[in-house]
Amino acid sequence: MKFTLLKKDNHSNARRGILETPHGTIQTPIFMPVGTQATVKGLMPRDLNELNAQIILGNTYHLYLRPGLDIISKAGGLHKFMGWSKPILTDSGGYQVFSLSKLRKITNEGVEFQSHIDGSYHFLTPQDAMRIQKILGSDIRMVFDECVPYPSDYNYTCNSLKITLEWAELCKNYRTLDDTDHAMFGIVQGGIYTDLRKNCAEALCEIGFDGYAVGGLSVGEPQNLMYEVAAYTAGLLPENQPRYFMGCGFPEDILHMVDSGLDMFDCVIPTRYGRNGTGFTSFGKLVVRNGEYKDDMNPLDSNCGCYTCRNFSRAYLRHLFNTNEMLGPVLLSLHNIYFFLNLMQNIRDAIDDGSFVEFKKEFLNNIIQGEK
């Protein structure tokens, strides 16, 4: 993997870059649609290609449990299994182990957990997490870490961080000379404590990774605190390597994170909101189920050029949801992914022409005015 920093904004910390991977080139800042179980819910790979999705995210924990590594290995890796030819980033499974497992026990060696699917017991080590991702064949692989909940006291966070850093070194050491055609990202943990964030970032940089992620935020802490800690953490990371904020999903949050110097984002929010009847628009969120759209023949967003907005009215979308037709979630999910990817293109264009600060201000003002 190669990352090239193309430009830095003169009035903020926003950056433009190019990330080259074995399965294609990625323009940053970038949003990655989430394909948790080898699919971005509601969309075909053809749709994602037409929407110009440059990279998607797969989930190690879910794919390890179902369909299992034997099946994906037999298919020739995750790309072939799901019919996707562009880059894939896989998380380590750590977050899901800690958030979904019915029972878990953390040791220095790894985590024993109980599957949320069938209650079966598993033990996952840092080496296992990397072995699984190697079988998946992803382009960018995340180290195994512990994501501490919010709130967590200082001592718990400090002890967790020690284990996370030990695991990061084990992940790095698992890499062999015949397995270097991918990128490995370290994950900065430390909760809301800036001294722990600093210690973690410094230790990860000493171990040496191809990129670095900000983890352990967007887990329930106040928005302003998330912005503050993320911006602080971004400033600790190497300038010539990609910076990834994990789980950042609302447009306004992404804009603030780009402003802080972060490059990569992912979240299930576009498709999750789409499945539940909420569209993201240039004037804020719109719930198409609402009665006021019963005979509204306007598109979801008149400023949007996606397939949904070019062809269907709010009234039709509301009808689909009220009759439980599967096309409704599909059309709204497609629109939402388009909206997020188009937002990132506009952000990149604004950084390129030096107007990012103005673009951010106008976008946020339109959302605030529209949602009043």
Image (cartoon, grey):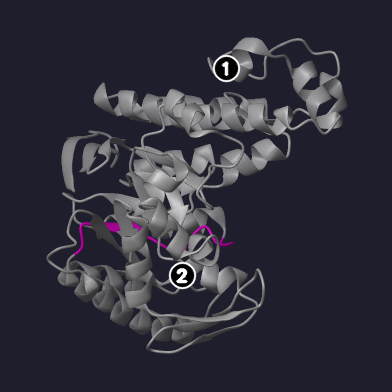
In-image side of 337 versus 187 (left or right): right
Q: Main secondary structure of the magenta part?
A: loop
Q: Amino acid at mark 1?
A: Tyr
Q: Are marks 1 and 2 in contact (CB under 8 Å)?
A: no
Numbered mark located on residue 307 in the image: 1
Q: Amino acid at mark 2?
A: Gly
Q: Position of residue 236 (x, y in %)?
A: 25, 60
Q: Identify the residue at image location x=46%, y=66%.
A: 93
Residue 302 vertical placement versus 119 (above, below): above
- Work out whether residue 141 or residue 77 is closer to the camera in this orientation and state it: 77
Q: Identify the residue at image location x=26%, y=78%.
A: 170
Which residue lies under the disc numbered 2?
A: 94
In-image side of 241 versus 290 (left or right): left
The quarter of the rendered structure image containing the C terminus is: top right
Residue 12 vertical placement versus 226 (above, below): above
For label 2, the crowd category at 10 Å Cα-Cα, with few meaning under 14, some 14 to 19 and many 20 or more, is many
Mark 1 / mark 2, whichever is N-terminal = 2
Question: For residue 177: magenta?
Answer: no
